[in-house]
Image (cartoon, rainbow, N blue to C red):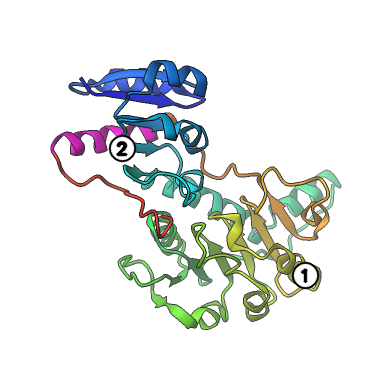
């Protein structure tokens, strides 16, 4: 009987969920410790877990056929020095709702001046100044994968116009206008909101840079829910300090945790949320494994396969 090794800090919860799923012809073993994993699961054909833990075990998995990561980002497994003789699938299709809540939540917080209203209440000061609105604004999505597509649909619900910048695809019908290649500055021109949902690849490194910030209107709000490597952080600090853009909301960073001496801690009009925008809830991720396992035993292509060379 084939065996799946669950290697995660939430291994016990994942194991219960998989046991309840009643998958046929599958033995389950689980742990959060790499050392224990070597003794109980080194001969496993399948691994389900966190990329940082799996990376340590990878050379010892002699029968490995498939890894289902519990994260969307699988950078720890993409090092060219690591083996690539297995199928790697990541977590996709489960973060769109969470990211939409996050993005719209912060846009409403800023546009509706919620903190200012509360401050006025604390000061017993009547503040009936007009607020902004999402309706009629233009949002630009850097990357329109599963998360970007969900954001596009949410933006349309609030009456926004949607631009999308992608490598080539134009599959999301909620995007009003697509941009590709060297049209990035035209894409950014006139945006009210810019949201980066970019993966971590050599092509996306510092794609959000000083040139892009200079193209945005001064009232623009920038949000990053993709990968920290997509943003030139020094350029963002300059853009906020010089008033080239109005606000920035960052969930991800080039180095995590953020160093104590990083300038972001004192940068004006910057909101940080410390990689909490869309956590991997075990029930959601387990559904991905179950769906892919059933495809696997039917010898059908798995969903959300990662191309090692492309990085996503």
The answer to whether 56 is drawn above or below residue 231 in the figure is: above
Q: Is residue 5 magenta?
A: no
* Residue span colored magenta: 283-298
Q: Secondary structure at mark 2?
A: strand
Q: CA distance from mark 2 to mark 1?
A: 44 Å
- Rendered residue at 65%/52% (across/down): 253
The residue to which callout 1 is attached is 238
Locate the C terminus by quadrant. bottom left
Along the line of sight, the residue nearer the viewer: 260 or 21: 260
Task: Say whether residue 33 is visible.
Answer: no
Residue 219 visible: yes
Please give the name of the residue rendered at 18% of the width and 22% of the height, measured from the top-left corner. 24
Question: What percent of the width, then of the height, locates residue 216?
Answer: 63, 77
- Is 254 on the left or on the right of 265, as rendered? left
Toward which corner of the image does residue 206 lie, by quadrant? Answer: bottom right
Q: Nearer the viewer, residue 270 or 125?
A: 270
Mark 2 vs 1, N-terminal side: 2
Instruction: Check the image and report above or below for 166 versus 106.
Output: below
- Rendered-image quadrant of the N terminus: top left
In the picture as drawn, the residue positioned furthest to the right comes out as: 123
Residue hosting label 2: 66
Tag 2 and tag 1, C-beta contact below 8 Å: no
Q: How many numbered circles does the render carry?
A: 2
* 304, above or below 134, in the image: above
Q: Residues within 10 Å of mark 1 (few under 14, many from 20)?
A: some
Q: Position of residue 272 (x, y in %)?
A: 69, 50
In the rendered structure, the answer to whether residue 167 lies left or right of residue 63 reads right
């Amino acid at each position: 009987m084939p065996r799946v090794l669950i290697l995660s800090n939430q291994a016990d919860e994942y194991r219960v969920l998989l046991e309840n799923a009643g998958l046929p012809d599958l033995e389950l073993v689980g742990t959060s410790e790499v050392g224990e994993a070597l003794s109980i699961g080194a001969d496993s054909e399948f691994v389900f877990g966190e990329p940082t833990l799996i990376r340590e075990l990878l050379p010892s998995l002699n029968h490995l056929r498939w890894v289902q990561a519990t994260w969307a980002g699988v950078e720890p497994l993409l090092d060219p020095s690591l083996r690539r003789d297995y199928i790697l699938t990541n977590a996709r299709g489960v973060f769109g709702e969470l990211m939409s809540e996050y993005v719209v939540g912060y846009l409403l917080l800023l546009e509706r001046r919620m903190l200012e209203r509360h401050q006025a209440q604390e000061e017993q000061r009547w503040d009936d100044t007009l607020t902004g609105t999402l309706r009629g604004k233009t949002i630009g999505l850097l990357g329109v994968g599963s998360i970007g597509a969900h954001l596009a649909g949410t933006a349309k619900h609030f009456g926004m116009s949607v631009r999308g910048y992608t490598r080539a695809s134009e599959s999301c019908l909620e995007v009003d206008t697509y941009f590709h290649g060297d049209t990035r500055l035209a894409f950014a021109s006139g945006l009210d909101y810019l949201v980066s949902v970019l993966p971590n690849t050599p092509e996306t490194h510092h794609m959000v840079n000083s040139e892009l910030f200079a193209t945005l209107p001064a009232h623009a709000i920038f949000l990053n829910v993709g990968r920290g490597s997509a943003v030139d952080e020094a350029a963002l600090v300059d853009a906020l300090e010089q008033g080239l853009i109005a606000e920035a909301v960052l969930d991800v960073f080039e180095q995590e945790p953020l160093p104590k001496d990083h300038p972001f801690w004192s940068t004006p009009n910057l909101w940080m949320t410390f990689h909490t925008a869309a956590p991997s809830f075990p029930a959601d991720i387990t559904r991905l494994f179950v769906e892919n396992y059933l495809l696997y035993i039917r010898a059908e292509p798995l969903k959300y396969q990662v191309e090692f060379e492309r990085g996503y």
